[in-house]
Structure formats: structure tokens, C-alpha cells
Amino acid sequence: MNEVSVHESLENENELDLGGYVEQQQQKQLLRFLTCGSVDDGKSTLIGRLLHDSAQIYDDQLATLEQESARIGSTGDKLDLALLVDGLQAEREQGITIDVAYRYFSTDKRKFIIADTPGHEQYTRNMATGASTCDVAVILIDARYGVQTQTRRHAYIASLLGIKHLVIAINKMDLMGFEQSVFKDISEQFAEFSKQLAPLNVDYVPLSALDGDNVVNVSSEMPWYQGQTLLLALESIDLDANSDDKTITQGFRFPVQHVQRPHLNFRGFSGYIASGHVRVGDPVTILPSGKQTQVVSIVTFDGNLDSAQTGQAITITLADEVDVSRGDLIVSGDDHNLLPTISNSVTVDLVWLDETPLEIDRLYNVKVASKLTQAKIVNIDHIKDINSLETTTGLVGLNTIARVQLQLVEALPLEAYSQCQATGSLILIDRLSNATLAALMVVNATPATFAKSTTTNSSARYSAEELALNAWVREYYPHWNAKDLSQS
């Protein structure tokens, strides 16, 4: 798409009445992508250039940007487009991105949500957060330095989180004289590295975010490059193929978030459909109990529906008075071969997000979908070396990627992250500070042999310190009538 067609599409949208504009936007496909890569590769500048050249900046924003660029900009006489995205005071003072910044824009072909993620190693956790909801990762590489450790880390995390399409934006080509050999060498470097990742679709675009070459408009400085601009590449990505990869199971998965009981004659179960679809009359199974029943109605704010599909927020009512609580999972059918595994022993890939290192056998809170329970990590299988992608051993600390064995205190319905993200992703939470410590992706779930024993074993449910405190309270304050946790 060239500069003229971008502005023409915006003029056409301005001619529509409000109803027509809303209808037009609803018909466009939404693409979520993140920008990531090593520090100072130009991620925020790239997003600013993308918004600026596609005419997505209002006049008052442009006026403010000109003032801010003159006051604190780092690009000389040119607009510092990174200031459009870096909103925190600390970000502007240091010239870096710290938090995940989200921006929205649309063209005549597609709607976009951009997540601008930080490049500094200490903020890798923010990058993982931004990547968890994205379809595509745009990984920037500074043409002066080539593929860096953080480039590899971000590519590996994107692959781990199920992102199947990468756009490698080789930025700052202007500083290397727009040499084709520079683009070719870096493309080959990354292509060699990506062979060790899960199967990916990779596009390579040489560009200069500062001057706008090959971002929205075709560059006259690189006639040797006959490929697409960055915007055109993003508009051309097949989202349907990506969505199939994200929920390979395609079975109905409905984590219950809330039990609705507005009056005695109504009992419904609210949540969003994580994968698959459901129709009135469909047989369903409640997990982990295994009880089977039928869908009676699908209720929404806009009225009852005959069917619903992935991504919709609904309330369903069931034919039988089965026990269903927040955190339970409603799935399709009664074919046990297609159901998630009821498991309390899980192999997971882990991205550690906290400065406090992992402790073996320490009890943590774990959340999967809307279910909150406890678990401990009983073994570290290996740690992934980001540079070589070989496996090593050692301490699991901030930004470490490892494969571990997780022992849950109760059996839950789980399946591989590659099959269904909603039932294959967990977060590890500190029980005292409530801080999120790690993102977990299920690799394999072992069927639970004795599910009940995991919920009644006090040593698994409570730490030694908690049991000791409970015993002390019962001894010195018997009038409190504290429950004996060792017998629970």
C-alpha cells in the first residue's frame, strides 16, 4: 500500500456516516502483533512511524509531538516518533520502553492492535505478557549489530507462546548505507537460528523506521529489495491459519468464571468460549467431576442464541442439576479420547518472571483459566541456553526458560499448550505477595491415579511453617477453636 492509497482509504472512511463506519470496522479482520527485540533497536520509533505514515495521528497529537520532540527528543531536527508510544515519564527520560504500550489503528484491509514491548533484559517478563495474546511478532534487529541474545530470547519466547508467524524487521539500514549484503547476512543469521525453533513462517523486511523506508511506503534507497513493505506484510498474513494453530483441538472448552443465580428459577454458568463452538442441545461433560449433561440455552446480553463460538462471552444453562463451580471446565461430548487429561502431575515449560529464584518443593498458588489452586515444582528437567538452545542445569532465576515437573494439590483438566492454550497455560503466583512468578505452558499431563489423595494430603496443601503456626495457635489459643490443619 502506498502513501496515496492510505490517505484515500481514510478519506473514504470519513465520508461514511457513523453507522456505516462502525459496520465497516466490524467486517475487518483484527490482527494483534507485538514489536520486540534487543534494546534500542527502534521498536517505539517503528510504531510511531507506522502510525504517522498511515495518517493515524490527530492534529493535536502531532502538535504535541513536535513540542515534545524539540524539548526531549533524541533525533535532532526530526520528529521523535518514539514519544508517541513511550508514555511513562521514566521511559521518556531514559529513552527506553519499560511497560507494554498498546496502540490501535486500521487500514482499508485490516484492524490492528500493537503491543510495544521492552527490549531490556530485566523487562523480559513484560514482553512475555504482551506476546501471550498476539498472532504475530515483529522482531527488530539493528542492522549495525545483527542478531543479539535478546533477539534470540524474544524469538524463542514467541515460539514457546504459540506465535507461528514472525516478521524480522532489519532496522537502521540507513546507518549501513542501505547495503544489500548487510540485509542478506542478518537474514541468514536469523534463518539459521530459527531452524531450532518450532515450525515458523518468517518474513524479512529491510527498513529505516527513522526515515520511513519500507515501513508504509516503498523505499527508493533499496531498489534491490523487491518484497513487501512492513505494513503490506502485516496486511497479507493469513490469520485463519494462525488461529487453527492456536486451538488445534477445536473441541468446545468453556472455563466457568461465575455461577449466575439471579433468582430461584435460573442457574447459569458464565464465561468465555476458549475454543470450539456449542449449540443448544449439545451433550457436554463437566470436568474434573466427569458428570454429563446437555445444553438447554445459551444466554447473552443481546438475547438467547442457538449457537456460539470461540471468543464469545456467554451464559449457558444445563439440563441437570449437576455440581458446577467457578474454575470447572465444561467441554463437548462424552468421547473420553477427546477430553482433557485429569492430571495432578504435569511437565511444563516455564518462563521465570521474578527476581526471586525458583525454590524446589515450595508451595505456590497456581491459576489455570479461572481455577486457583496450589502446586509445587518437584524437579527441574533442564534449563534452555538462549544462545545455543542447548539444555543446561543450574538456578532458575529472572528470565530463565526451563522445563520442570509440576505437582498440583488437586487434579485438574489439562492438555498440551500446543493443543489448546486456554487449558494448557498456567501462571505461578507467590502465596504471600501475590506476585506473578512464572508463566507455564503444559507439555504433557500425566493422568491422575488417585485424584482424591491430592486434595486431602495436608503436607501437600500446607507448608511446614503453616502447619507449625497452626499447631502453636491451637496450643496457646484453644478458645479460638482453630481447625487442625494436619488432619485436613
Image (tube, rainbow, N blue to C red):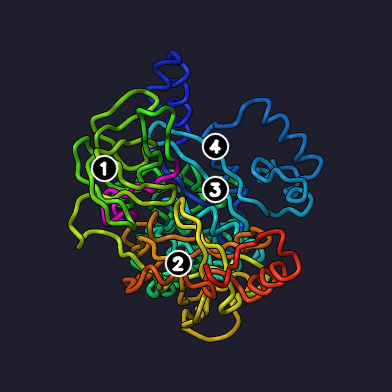
Image quadrant holding the N terminus, namely top left
Q: Which mark is residue 53?
A: 4
Q: Is residue 130 above or below residue 457?
A: above
**Secondary structure found at label 3:** strand
Disc 2 designates what residue? 455
Q: CA distance from mark 3 to mark 4?
A: 18 Å
- Magenta residues span 244-258
Q: Nearer the viewer, mark 4 or mark 2?
A: 2
Q: Residue at x 79, y 50 (%)?
A: 93
Q: Residue at x 63, y 72 (%)?
A: 467
The front one of 279 and 58 is 279
Image x and y of residue 452, in percent: 38, 68
Left or right relative to 437: residue 189: left
Q: Is residue 237 visible?
A: no
- The amino acid beneath tag 2 is Thr
Disc 3 designates what residue? 115
Q: Nearer the viewer, mark 3 or mark 4?
A: 3
Q: Earlier in the sequence, mark 4 or mark 1?
A: 4
- The amino acid beneath tag 3 is Ala
Furthest toward the front, the residue is: 479
The front one of 69 and 265 is 265
